[in-house]
Image: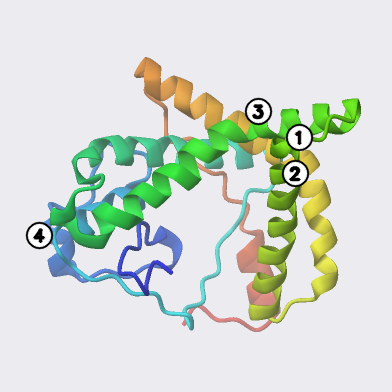
Amino acid sequence: MGDLLDCITVVPGVVGAFRVSAINKVGGFSTNTLAEDTDLTFAIKKAGYKIVYDQAAIAYTEAPQNYRDWLKQRYRWTFGTMQAVWKHRTSFLNPAHNNFGMIGLPYLVVYQIIFPLLNPVFDLVLVIGLITGRINLMVIALAAYTVLDFIYAGIALKLDREKLFNLWLIIPQRIIYRPFQYYIIVKSFLNVLKGQWVGWNKLKREGKLLAKMQKSGFSKT
């Protein structure tokens, strides 16, 4: 959607490519946010450049090997995104920045910050409603939201030619994974409000991905 509407808000550092001239025009990589790829993408869109999505792009990246490293990484991403949003806040609903300001940035704020902050409340209301048997409009809406989760995931699995059997993973994701997400988004938001600086929390590299790739015949050349 971001490509279609010309409002992509982040080119991930692991699988992104920029023209050097574009990076130089916006002053290079910023050092005052922890999500440098998001910050750079915002700056490039504000400068009037077009960013496109290449479905054929493939990247190999090493994921965190334990939940502590995962939490640190996600916390840095979330905190850094909030920093970038605040830094470029004048673009919010600003027609001068075209679809980035009118669609891309508002969409990011709503779906990556506001809704995640409210999700714990929504889930709590759903649980209370199911326990007490008081099925109100909000419970119905939240149940419909869960159904949409399955539909979106099913479409994604079909597009990636993955097995639909994997849809069952949404259940443990909602029970186990999402509470960690809630913790990260709330902690990030509170620290942003306090003006607290966060370190890089560099991910420890184990080298396991490279070993597996070499074993399968992959060559860096």
Above or below for 7 versus 203: below
Circle 4 residue: 25
Around disc 4, counting alpha carbons within 10 Å, would you say few (fewer than 14), some (14 to 19), or many (20 or more)?
A: few
Asked if one can make out residue 41 in the rendered structure from this viewpoint, the answer is no
Give the distance between the C-alpha atoms of the residues marked 4 and 2, in whole angstroms. Answer: 50 Å
Reading the chain from its start, which is encountered first: label 4 or label 2? 4
- Name the element at disc 4: helix
Which of the two labelled residues, at mark 1 and mark 3, occupies the earlier sequence position? 3
Residue 182 horizontal/vertical position (percent): 62, 33
Instruction: Provide the secondary structure element on which disc 2 rests.
Output: helix
Q: Amino acid at mark 2?
A: Ile
Say which of marks 1 and 4 sits in front. 1
Residue bearing mark 1: 136
Instruction: Give me the residue at 47% from left, 78% from top.
Output: 57
Query: Identity of the amino acid at label 4?
Result: Lys
Badge 2 is on which residue?
140
Q: CA distance from mark 1 to mark 2?
A: 6 Å
Dot 3: element: helix
Which residue carries the number 3 mark? 121
Q: Nearer the viewer, mark 4 or mark 2?
A: 2
Give yes or no for contact between labels 1 and 4 (Cβ–Cβ under 8 Å).
no
| 183 up-or-down from 110: above or below | above
Tags 1 and 2 touching, CB below 8 Å:
yes
Q: Which SS class for mark 1?
A: loop
Using the rendered image of the protein, determine whether residue 200 is visible from the camera's viewpoint: yes
Indicate how the structure is coloured in the image: rainbow
Disc 2 to disc 3: CB gap under 8 Å: no
Which labelled disc corresponds to residue 162? none
